[in-house]
């Protein structure tokens, strides 16, 4: 049986859209386009 009082104490609200956007843009995310571009640049030298 769930103890709702204990579960409510553990609850953390999800990030708002603006906070998520900031967190994502702070990360250095490399996608496949970046990888392919780097490989092409290295092979053309």
Image (tube, rainbow, N blue to C red):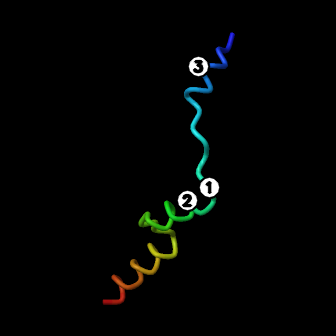
Depth check, front residue: 38 or 4: 4
Apparent side of residue 26 relative to residue 14 in the rendered image (left or right): left
Mark 3 Cα shell of 10 Å, populated few (<14), some (14-19), many (≥20): few
- Specify the quadrant that holds the N terminus: top right
Q: Quadrant of residue 41?
A: bottom left
The image position of residue 10, as x and y in percent, is: 55, 28
Apparent side of residue 16 relative to residue 37 in the rendered image (left or right): right
Q: Secondary structure at mark 2?
A: helix
- Residues under numbered marks 2 and 1 in contact, where contact means CB atoms less than 8 Å apart: yes
Mark 1 Cα shell of 10 Å, populated few (<14), some (14-19), many (≥20): few
Q: Which residue is mark 1?
A: 16
- Residues under numbered marks 2 and 3 in contact, where contact means CB atoms less than 8 Å apart: no
Q: Earlier in the sequence, mark 2 or mark 3?
A: 3
The image position of residue 12, as x and y in percent, is: 57, 38
The relative height of residue 16 versus residue 43 in the rendered view (above or below) is: above
**Real-space Cα separation, disc 2 to disc 3, in angstroms:** 27 Å
Mark number displayed over residue 40: none
Q: Which residue is mark 2?
A: 19
Q: Which residue is mark 3?
A: 6
Q: Residue furthest bottom?
A: 45
**Real-space Cα separation, disc 2 to disc 1, in angstroms:** 5 Å
The residue under the point 56% across, 58% down is 20
């Amino acid at each position: 049986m769930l103890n709702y009082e204990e579960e409510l104490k553990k609850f953390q609200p999800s990030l708002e859209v603006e906070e998520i956007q900031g967190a994502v843009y702070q990360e250095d995310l490399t996608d496949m386009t970046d990888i392919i571009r780097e490989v092409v640049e290295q092979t053309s030298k």
